[in-house]
Amino acid sequence: DSGVTQTPKHLITATGQRVTLRCSPRSGDLSVYWYQQSLDQGLQFLIQYYNGEERAKGNILERFSAQQFPDLHSELNLSSLELGDSALYFCASSVSDSRQETQYFGPGTRLLVL
Amino acid sequence: AQTVTQSQPEMSVQEAETVTLSCTYDTSESNYYLFWYKQPPSRQMILVIRQEAYKQQNATENRFSVNFQKAAKSFSLKISDSQLGDTAMYFCAFRGAGGTSYGKLTFGQGTILTVHP
């Protein structure tokens, strides 16, 4: 158990809908990262937050947004869902935003868009 | 942009034997960090080992060790005394120490390792 929690574990929804994925980092960690794992794209970095502020952006679609709250939990919002958004979404956390920090991953949220 | 390549989609090994998983990467940065993550059937991503590019000594964690060849941009993982619980997908990952690679990990495509009894 990495100490990173993600809810829900599974999510089934329809095209065009909007969902919110939630992540709680390890105790003491200030930085949160979101990754998407899909069959065709592999594991891709989406976005990073540090202490409430956006730090880095990767291949995140405009239909997707994220935020980190004062209690340091983070939410990833996915809207106007398409079939291709079906994937495993991971949250990871690290102590700081220093590049030397190891990222610890949560168990993931499996999203299925029908 | 950094790229990470794992050229072995699948590998298999007998229990108690040794196996080596390959990884190469491409970067223009001189300082960076390399990782191996394990993803068992539960899909949890578990850190196996990490290597700092500025360290010449290869990292070791119990049965897991790496062969880091900076000039060749190669970072292989050796698993000794393989156990059934080592069956998983293994991902090689790169994290730059500067520039635009600020926070992200760049992953390879993964290698599925099966340990046979």
Image: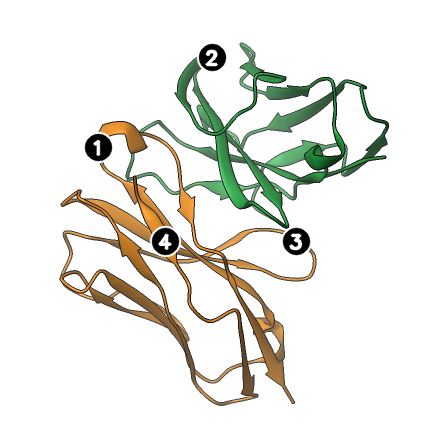
User: Residue placed at 47% from the left, 85% from the top?
Assistant: B81
- Position of the N terminus of chain B, as image quadrant, is top left
Question: Hey, what amino acid is under mark 4?
Answer: Val
4 vs 3, front mark: 4
Q: Residue at x 71, y 17 (%)?
A: A79
Alpha carbon distance from label 4 to label 3: 21 Å
* Mark 1 or 2: the one toward you: 1
Colour in which chain A is shown? Answer: green
Alpha carbons under labels 2 and 4: distance apart:
30 Å
| Dot 1 and dot 3 within a common chain | yes
The amino acid type found where label 2 is placed reads Gly
Q: Are marks 2 and 4 on the same chain?
A: no
Nearer the observer: mark 1 or 4; the answer is 4
Identify the amino acid type marked 3: Arg
Q: Which residue is mark 1?
A: B98
Residue at horizontal 63%, vertical 22%?
Answer: A76
Q: Which mark is residue B4?
A: 4
Which residue is under mark 3?
Answer: B43
Q: Which residue is mark 2?
A: A52
Give the CA distance from mark 1 to mark 2. Answer: 21 Å
Residue B49 appears in which quarter of the rendering?
Answer: bottom left
Q: Chain of mark 3?
A: B
Placement of B90 over or under A75, stated as above or below = below
